[in-house]
Image (cartoon, helix red, strand yellow):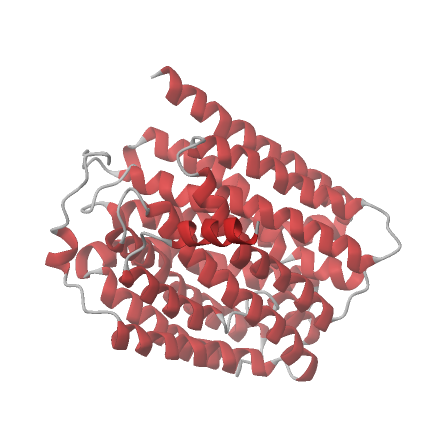
Amino acid sequence: MIAATANLYKQAYSGLTRKMWLLSIVMLINRSGTMVLAFMTLYCKHRGYSIEQGGFVVAVYGVGSVLGALGGGKLADKFGFYYVQFGALFLGGILFMVLGLMDSFLSICVCTFALAMVNESFRPANSSAIAYYSTPQNRTQSFALVRLAINLGFGVGIALGGFLASINYHLLFWVDGFTNISAAFLLLLILPKVTLKQQHSTITSKTEVKSTKSAYTDKNFLWFLFFQLVFAICFFQLFTTIPIFFKDGLKLDEFWIGVVMSVNGIIIAVIEMVLVFKLEGRRPYLLLMSYGSVLMGLSFLLLNIPLSSGLLVALISTVVITFSEMLSMPFMNSYYISLSTEKNRGQYAGMYTMSWSLAQVIGSSTGGVYAEKFGFTSLWTLVFILCLVAAGGFYLLQRRKNLT
């Protein structure tokens, strides 16, 4: 049994390129400091601002990240993903530190906007890098490996963030900035430089779509983005309304909130690569996204269970939403990458990242307001319904694909 399990893990991690492992190390270092955004609503409350104002700050981050995603995608196609990744990490690290020095609500919003534009320009460039360093056969594994590094780092960062927040919230900004800058120079140190000519010279595999049409006119991609937007609006409650609910509704302090949220990253680090390996090629990507959306809806509905232990409720919901992520997000990346080519991949990646950013704006700005007016019980029920809408949309897209 132990030998079979060990062999399964070995197979799940085999076939990945050395550069993918190096890129994942960079992401692990970067995300080990991820804590500011997850604690932003609590930080704003700590500074004396309301839940709506805290949600507004996260929404401002989302607006900036929409522009950063579009700009990052275009810059990655024009100048190369290598340089965009470095610039975003380095400048983002500086801006994290600057944000921690801001006092007024306006200055916090302005600096958050600038940080988001720079920080989120990294994502489409990073997606292009993953596609470049991988093959169509191991692309989902490659995305899963980077997600593993991100979530393992997130698990460490969020737990550390809860501890630091219990001492001094300003420490979050310095640690986040330091890890960003460290990751930037590590990228230069361990990954060979990739020029724009090299980036565009990769021969597109026969298994990939050859069309060079614009992402803006690809109907399948646009419908996918719409349902992914609905999915992501629900997911981003994890960083806005859920921390507030854990504190006010379930009576958990910052330390235990950090511990519970770190479970998400730990489970992904242990299970996701094996799960992706077992599912790759056995189920259509869109169908897996549909399953994951249903699970996400259930994770929010579980928050309405009147258990005596708030910690138990939080843990159960977190475990379910984690499995929802693992069934959906790695395959979302592979799906949109399969629709693109090397020359327009930054455009597709930018649109995909922008959709996540837009969801952050909508989810962050409306979740807190809705909870204030109608209560958390009503909010979790609404999120459950929206998740079912996303699940139905992905399922119908798959049916449409089968008929063509």
Task: Classify residue 118 as left or right of residue 320.
Answer: left
* Above or below for 275 versus 114: above
How far from the left and from the top, in percent, is residue 383? 65, 41
* Above or below for 377 versus 149: above
How far from the left and from the top, in percent, is residue 29? 43, 73
The structure residue drawn at horizontal position 37% and vertical position 58%, both measured from the top left corner, is: 123
Q: How many marks?
A: 0
Residue in the foreground of this view, choosing between 280 and 203: 280
The structure residue drawn at horizontal position 43% and vertical position 44%, both measured from the top left corner, is: 277
How far from the left and from the top, in percent, is residue 341? 22, 42
Task: Classify residue 373 as left or right of residue 324.
Answer: right
Residue in the foreground of this view, choosing between 366 and 152: 152
Q: Residue furthest top?
A: 403
Task: Classify residue 175 as left or right of residue 245.
Answer: left
* Above or below for 341 versus 154: above
Residue in the foreground of this view, choosing between 325 and 39: 325
The structure residue drawn at horizontal position 31% and vertical position 60%, both measured from the top left corner, is: 20
The structure residue drawn at horizontal position 38% and vertical position 69%, both measured from the top left corner, is: 25
Q: Quadrant of residue 386?
A: top right
